[in-house]
Image (tube, coloured by chain):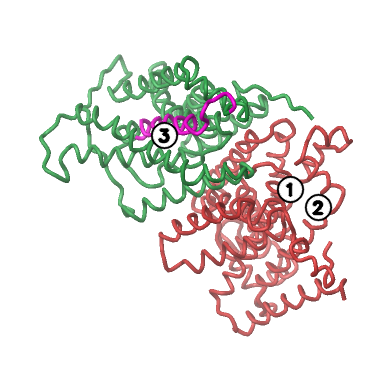
Chain colours: A red, B green
Amino acid sequence: MQRYSVPALVVLAGLILCLASQFGWIDLYVQTTIMFLFINVIMSTSLNLINGNMGEFSCGHAGFMCVGAYVSSIVSVALFAKSSYFGAPLLPPAWAVLGMPLSLLAGGVAAAFAGLLVAFPSFRTRGDYLAIVTLAANYIIMSVFVNLDMVGGPRGFMGMKKVISAMNEVADIPWMMLLTFACTVFTVFILRRFLSSSLGKGVNAVCQDEIAAEIMSVNTNRIKLVAFMLSSGLAGLAGGLLAHIMGYVNPSGFGILKSTEAMVMVYLGGMGSITGAVLSAVLMTGLIELLRPLGILKWVVIPLLLVLLMQFRPAGLMGSRELADVFPRLRRFYKFK
Amino acid sequence: MLDTLLQNILNALQWGSFYALIALGYCLVYGVLLLINFAHGDIFMVGAYIAFFVSTLLLGQYTAMPHLPGWLVLALAVPATMLLTSGVGVFLERVAYRPLRRKGVNRLYVVITALMCGLILENGNLWLLGASRKSFPELLDKAIWTFGAVSVTNLKILVIVSAFAVFWLLNTIVTKTKIGMAMRALSWDRFAVPLMGIPPDTVIVFTFVLGSSMAALAGILFAMSYPVLDPYMGASIGWKAFIAAVVGGIGDIRGAFVGGFILGFVEIMVVAFFPSSYRDLFAFTILLIIMTWKPTGLFGVAKTTKI
């Protein structure tokens, strides 16, 4: 039971979500909010790897999301939809059902390679100096897409809705909900596996003392390279999902503000805690939706709440602990590695 | 060709002055506290707004005031704005940063708090004053001098001269005075300084006063040069000034000053010779190369780490 409880719960939750959105038990607004919540979970857990576990201060996470969003939408639109950018679809649109996860993956891989932009300077640059390298990377990526006229430039890129409707013609199920849920589970699972592997131990070692880690024969450059690529690749996955849910991408949507949002979620949850990152993503998304009636005042109230929270819980919600550290008795019921 | 180059150099000096003034504030606070004060760009915005209200008040927009000439309004508005804005900076320090520092939390949490304070200032302003942009009154009569094809306004000269004067002043304060010595001591060893009988909180408050009043000066000069104010004006210029400060080598005021001008020059020169949408791309690629080449900035000294 210990072994199967988490997979069973995950499958059950996914099934309930998909059924609920299939039969209209929850309306479209709630569905979209839940999908945004999953995307925020991916963003905060993946940034947590760099900012929490590795102790660097990356403030350009949205840039990698931008790469993922653009590459995956370009791939899926070019392959499965008629568009003004690429003309007729290269493959029959019905294949989108199979091709869609692949296009998301392509976005993730492209974002992982964009992560090299930060990973290579990180070999020599550290701390606050690395923070501005990430910031500059975010600006550079945004600027590249603004200047790429082929994919719409500052006007943005669209056409992903056609791919989704082609998928719905094959089988009328909530594809995006399914994919988003699957990707979120994949992200949390892979990050957990990564952190309990020897590479993950290396990440924690780099955080505590880079020189000592190096003396202990940890290949710090390799660790940094892998960690940055994994983190930015997962952000690219989130970007691809976001692009397909919105049906529209625009480079200005992936600015510093978006990076700030991800950063806030990481530090709110507590550095280095996956549970904390998930929890704070849920909390932030919920708070943003709940306070929507306040209008612009919302963006005064939320930061104020966060400032107050920082005063009372100065290490974030969970500190660096996981769920099983807070409730040790839960260990009897589940095992998640 | 030479004329356009000269003209662009002048423009770059002006544009770089704003970055340099804001970067100095980042750098002072960072040097003393190792805190990236992300609210600093928004303090610059607050400074511009305070300057707007002070000068419209002095011009008699709200109450009956004796008619004052523009230069006198400017001369009164500058110290008033600097005073009020440093009040805002010190308020943030007292309310948000100091309690966290006392608890000895990881410094990144203080950075996030600063980020949140910046958002509060931006959006609080938007909520209080509405989205309509304010246009700054013209305080100085515009004078344009032309040398061949190069034209200079008196405002441009004022901006550049005050940036250099402020740098000289700060450099003197930091290197020659007692409180400057205390600031350097605090950044050198924050545990030994209280033992020597120096009150660290006073030094920190003084640092915030200096930094915020520099931002206020930048705000008033910016509002005079580009007389349209909106609540988000501080966000992007603040981030870029932070980048400039780090490229110079954060913690060294020469570095922040030079870094501000480098960023200004790159941006203006790119816009002069390429389409303006390439500005960020070129500017930040160059900065990325500088950071890869000199990992601790131009003036920064690599810290030796001991195990």
Q: Secondary structure at mark 2?
A: helix
Asked if both marks, 3 and 2, belong to the same chain, the answer given is: no
The local crowd at label 2, few if under 14, some if 14 to 19, many if 20 or more residues have their Cα within 10 Å, is many
Q: Amino acid at mark 3?
A: Ser
Residue type at mark 1?
Asn
**Mark 1 touches mark 2? (CB < 8 Å):** yes
Q: Residue at x 54, y 25 (%)?
A: B197
Q: Residues within 10 Å of mark 3 (few under 14, many from 20)?
A: many
Q: Is residue A334 above or below residue B263?
A: below
Q: Mark 2 is on which residue type?
A: Leu
Q: Give how far across and how far down residue A95 sits, in percent.
A: 73, 69
Q: CA distance from mark 3 to mark 2?
A: 42 Å
Is residue A148 at all visible to an observer of this figure?
A: no
Please say whether residue B198 is one of the residues in the magenta stretch: yes
Residue A144 rendering spot, x and y as whole percentages: 58, 43
Whether marks 1 and 2 lie on the same chain: yes
Residue span colored magenta: B195-219
Q: Position of residue A244 (x, y in %)?
A: 61, 64
What kind of element bears circle 3?
Answer: helix
Chain ID at mark 3 = B
Q: In this image, B29 relative to A190: left or right?
A: left
Per the image, the residue denoted by label 1 is A53
User: Which residue is labeled 3 in the image?
Assistant: B212
Residue at the image point whose x is 57% and y is 29% from the top:
B194
Distance of label 3 from label 1 (alpha carbons): 34 Å
Examine the rendered structure and indicate whether residue B275 appears above or below residue A235. above
Magenta stretch: helix, strand or loop mostly: helix
